[in-house]
């Protein structure tokens, strides 16, 4: 039985990856930070049977003694390093914390592999945020990087740390340059989930209006369930390497919101510009979307669209879920959650 160690197991990707690896018969170990509620994040949505099969190790990736110990004890065949301060907006307010977790934590992970489990195959969650102010459209593995946030800079350091350990010590370490991927397990602070949750709450008259920042930002949004399969494929490959996973489609935040309201039968009509732009229910005229500058970022990534042809060619990976189906899946999940909440 293969053993996998997942950092960030309580997050969105941790949830889908755990399900995938259990289905494939892996022994799954996960690192979880202690909190006062003993909360296990998205793992609460696993079945009891699935939860019972996971071994949790309680600690923080910034603690190298703890990480060394876990690596020595578990001796995993595969390590999926997903843990990070992953919210770009928050990284502008807390750059030091973001660097400590994303750079320091990643260094602790690769070093523990080198010292205590050098035959482990290692996956690092790099990101399309490395491309930031894009130097080429679409973005591929060879596109020059230009990060635009403390988060992007921290992940760039992680990317090069992984590549440097791979080349210096002959370790199997791969970078997944993943474009935005979403799901009903997405944190509610990210724009897609913020929108789908608001649509559900507006539908049930629990909220009047949705406030957003930059409606013009374009993202290449895929489904997290498809992307964790790509992570796994990277570690089954004949050699360690860096791969883009994306859909090769891009949509504005405005389009995502429009599509989400459509799922509950509401057509949005836009009027005005910039901070004065609003979205009205085309039927009732009610204002449902407003712009609030507090959600603008000091530096924005305007356009992301990825070219995943290398992953397709070398790993046989392709995204399966289309944009409209992703939006529908997320709105329907939030409608159900909100309705269940109303029932008590
Ligand atoms: P997420 O939902 O925010 O999950 C992040 C995970 O990291 C959580 O389990 C969190 O634990 C854990 N974590 C944070 N700081 C930690 C620390 N100091 N010690 C131990 N655990 C810590 O992120 P995601 O969307 O699943 O993304 C997974 C990874 O892929 C992240 O590294 C992210 O930066 C990267 N990425 C994501 C996307 C995307 O679109 N989703 C795209 C490219 C790259 P708590 O539950 O305790 O907070
Ligand atoms: O949903 P977001 O916060 O995701 P962002 O910044 O693209 O980062 C996500 O994807 C990265 C991959 O490219 C990951 F590495 C990272 O960990 C994370 O998962 O924002 C998307 C866009 C931005 O342009 C933002 O300015 O939506 C815009 N936006 C507009 N209004 C908003 C809002 N973002 C948020 N979070 N909240 C708003 O109200």
Image (spheres, rainbow, N blue to C red):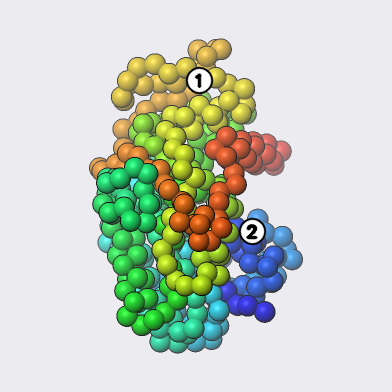
Q: How many labels does the image show?
A: 2
- What is the spatial separation of the Cα atoms under label 1 and label 2, in whole angstroms? 35 Å
User: Residue 9 is drawn in which quadrant?
Assistant: bottom right
Instruction: Label 2: state its secondary structure.
Output: helix
Residue 247, position in %: x, y? 49, 45
Question: Would residue 338 be seen by someone viewing this image from the given angle?
Answer: no
Question: Would residue 264 be seen by someone viewing this image from the given angle?
Answer: yes
Residue 213, position in %: x, y? 36, 34
Q: Which residue is drawn at 34% across and 66% down?
A: 158
Q: In this view, does 240 lie above or below 72?
A: above
- Of the 4 image quadrants, the one containing the C terminus is top right
Label 2 Cα neighbours within 10 Å, binned few <14 / some 14-19 / many ≥20? few
User: Residue 215 is drawn in which quadrant?
Assistant: top left
Residue 301, position in %: x, y? 32, 43
Q: In this view, does 267 lie above or below 128?
A: above
Q: Residue at x 27, y 54 (%)?
A: 144
Q: Is residue 207 above or below residue 151?
A: above
User: Is 1 in front, or is 273?
Assistant: 1
Instruction: Label 1: state its secondary structure.
Output: strand
User: Residue 15 is drawn in which quadrant?
Assistant: bottom right
User: Is 8 in front, or is 217?
Assistant: 217
Residue highlighted by disc 2: 44
- Of the 4 image quadrants, the one containing the N terminus is bottom right
Residue highlighted by disc 1: 268
Q: Which residue is drawn at 37% across and 76% down?
A: 166
């Amino acid at each position: 039985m293969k053993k996998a160690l997942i950092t960030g197991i309580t997050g969105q990707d941790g949830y889908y990856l755990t399900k995938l690896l259990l289905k494939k018969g892996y022994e799954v170990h996960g690192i979880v930070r202690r909190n006062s509620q003993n909360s296990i994040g998205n793992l609460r949505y696993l079945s009891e049977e699935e939860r019972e099969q996971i071994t949790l190790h309680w600690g923080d990736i910034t603690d190298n003694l703890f990480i060394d110990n876990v690596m020595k004890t578990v001796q995993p065949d595969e390590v999926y390093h997903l843990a990070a301060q992953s919210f770009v907006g928050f990284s502008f307010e807390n750059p030091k914390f973001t660097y400590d977790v994303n750079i320091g934590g990643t260094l602790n992970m690769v070093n523990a592999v080198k010292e205590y489990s050098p035959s482990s195959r290692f996956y690092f969650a790099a990101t399309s945020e490395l491309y930031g102010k894009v130097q080429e459209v679409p973005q591929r593995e060879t596109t020059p990087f230009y990060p635009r946030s403390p988060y992007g800079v921290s992940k760039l350091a992680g990317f090069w740390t992984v590549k440097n350990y791979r080349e210096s010590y002959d370790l199997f370490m791969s970078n997944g340059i993943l474009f935005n991927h979403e799901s009903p397990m997405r944190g509610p602070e990210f724009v897609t989930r913020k929108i789908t949750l608001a649509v559900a709450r507006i539908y049930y008259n629990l909220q009047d209006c949705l406030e957003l920042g930059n409606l013009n930002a374009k993202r290449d949004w895929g489904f997290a369930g498809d992307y964790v399969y790509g992570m796994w494929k990277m570690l089954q490959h004949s050699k360690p390497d860096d791969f883009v996973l994306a859909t090769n489609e891009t949509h504005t935040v405005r389009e995502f919101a429009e599509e989400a309201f459509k799922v509950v039968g509401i057509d949005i009509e836009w009027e005005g510009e910039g901070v004065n732009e609003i979205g009205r229910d085309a039927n009732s005229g009610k204002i449902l979307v407003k712009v609030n500058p507090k959600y603008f970022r000091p530096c924005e990534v305007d356009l992301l669209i990825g070219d995943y042809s290398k992953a397709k060619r070398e790993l046989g990976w392709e995204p399966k879920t289309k944009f409209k189906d992703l939006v529908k899946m997320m709105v329907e999940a939030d409608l159900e959650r909100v309705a269940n909440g109303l029932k008590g």
